[in-house]
């Protein structure tokens, strides 16, 4: 992909000045002339294309606050994708998120600005693995985290996200089920329910870096600090946390309770994104970047809208089966 360099003109500076005032606490002034021309160009082109930009909470602040029309966790992005009447959806997130949007909107064009933006959880399991699990546990239903490929979803009874996993698990009305692929999320759900879960050993490469031992010094250094953790973290981390929840759950916690100081034990960019609208909360940021989420950049979003690439395409036979498991999740949550 050739990236064109756009000029930071006085007109662009004036047009983007109010936006910069909003985000100045998280974007250094010296970087704004690089981002602003792309933000202006993307916002103009998305109108022409009748496109909507959906961005995950882990996208950089210049994407999250600069060009996204709708933002959220995986569950919210799936719901928002189901509701939009735009012709084109640009999914600023990772590949499974764009695939999920396409499953829900087979007739729309769903673009991902970098088709190589993957996910270590999605890569941890294949459709053949799920068939083997079913063969080993005949008649046991399969609940699959959305962080998986469409091929894996097609082998699934129902999907879940970190925001609704416990609810989905308990709604099936069974004593035992197969829960894939995130082992730590599975263990967390298992600790909250009487349903027995057969787990897989998939992990998020970003969240598995945190340890409980690393977090303890925050409590000593900042008395009264609140620790919020994503359930993709290992159990020793979750034990240290005051709250465990999806990215949207963590944001809700901050917005509603306005803690004086907080650590969000999750991907780095999220604290920046949330800090913009919560100026009275001090965010202490242990940094763990998702290299896949960070593959999405402003120049790639512009290129994606200019060339209408890369459009997500899913084998129709796979898509029909995968769609059922996503739609079932949306109905149940
Ligand atoms: P959320 O659904 O909580 O946003 O999580 C998605 C994800 O990829 C976390 O790593
Ligand atoms: Fe996947 Fe982890 Fe990145 Fe989320 S943060 S997209 S689970 S690798």
Image (cartoon, rainbow, N blue to C red):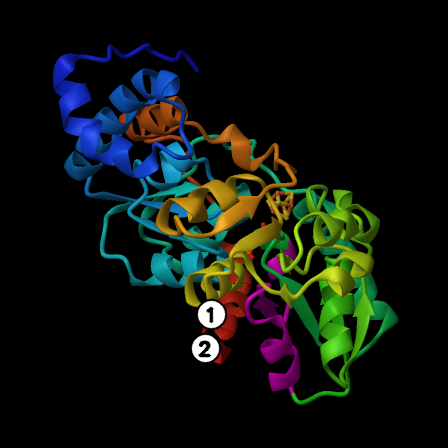
Q: Splitting the image into 4 quarters, where does residue 36 fall? A: top left
Q: Which residue is mark 1?
A: 327
**Of 227 and 299, the residue lying toward us:** 227
Q: Splitting the image into 4 quarters, where does residue 185 fall? A: bottom right
Q: Is mark 2 within 8 Å of ligand 1?
A: no
Q: Which residue is mark 2?
A: 331
Question: Which residue is found at the position 61% from the left and 37% from the top?
Answer: 290
Mark 2 residue element: helix
**Of 85 and 57, the residue lying toward us:** 57
Tags 2 and 1 touching, CB below 8 Å: yes
**Of 316 and 175, the residue lying toward us:** 175
Q: Is residue 312 left or right of residue 289?
A: left
Q: Is residue 185 left or right of residue 165?
A: right
Q: CA distance from mark 2 to mark 1?
A: 6 Å
- Can residue 69 be seen here? yes
Q: Which residues are magenta?
A: 152-172
Q: Splitting the image into 4 quarters, where does residue 196 fall? A: bottom right
Mark 1 residue element: helix
């Amino acid at each position: 992909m050739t990236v064109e360099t756009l000029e930071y003109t006085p007109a662009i500076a004036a047009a983007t000045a109010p936006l910069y005032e909003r985000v100045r606490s998280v974007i250094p002034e010296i970087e704004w002339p690089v981002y602003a021309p792309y933000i202006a160009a993307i916002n103009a082109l998305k109108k022409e294309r009748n496109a909507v930009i959906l961005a995950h909470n882990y996208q950089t602040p210049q994407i999250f606050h600069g060009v996204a029309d709708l933002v959220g966790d995986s569950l919210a992005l799936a719901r928002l994708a189901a509701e939009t009447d735009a012709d084109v959806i640009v999914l600023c997130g990772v590949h499974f998120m764009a695939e999920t949007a396409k499953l829900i909107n087979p007739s729309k064009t769903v673009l991902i600005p970098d088709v190589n933006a993957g996910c270590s959880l999605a890569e941890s399991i294949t459709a053949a693995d799920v068939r083997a699990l079913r063969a080993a546990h005949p008649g046991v239903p399969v609940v699959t985290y959305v962080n998986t490929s469409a091929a894996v979803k097609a082998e699934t009874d129902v999907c879940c996200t970190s925001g609704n996993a416990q609810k989905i698990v308990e709604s099936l009305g069974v004593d035992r089920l197969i829960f894939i692929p995130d082992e730590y999320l599975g263990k967390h759900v298992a600790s909250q329910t009487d349903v027995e879960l057969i787990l897989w050993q998939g992990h998020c490469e970003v969240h598995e870096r945190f340890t409980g031992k690393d977090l303890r010094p925050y409590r000593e250094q900042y008395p009264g600090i609140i620790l919020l953790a994503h359930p993709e973290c290992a159990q020793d981390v979750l034990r240290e946390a005051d709250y465990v929840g999806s990215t949207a759950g963590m944001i809700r916690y901050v917005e509603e309770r306005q803690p004086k100081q907080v650590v969000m034990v999750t991907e780095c960019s999220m604290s920046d994104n949330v800090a913009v609208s919560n100026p009275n909360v001090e965010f202490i940021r242990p940094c763990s970047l998702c290299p896949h989420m960070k593959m999405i950049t402003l120049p790639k979003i512009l290129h994606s809208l200019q060339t209408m690439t890369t459009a997500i395409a899913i084998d129709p036979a796979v898509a029909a089966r995968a769609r059922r498991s996503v739609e079932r999740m949306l109905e149940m949550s």
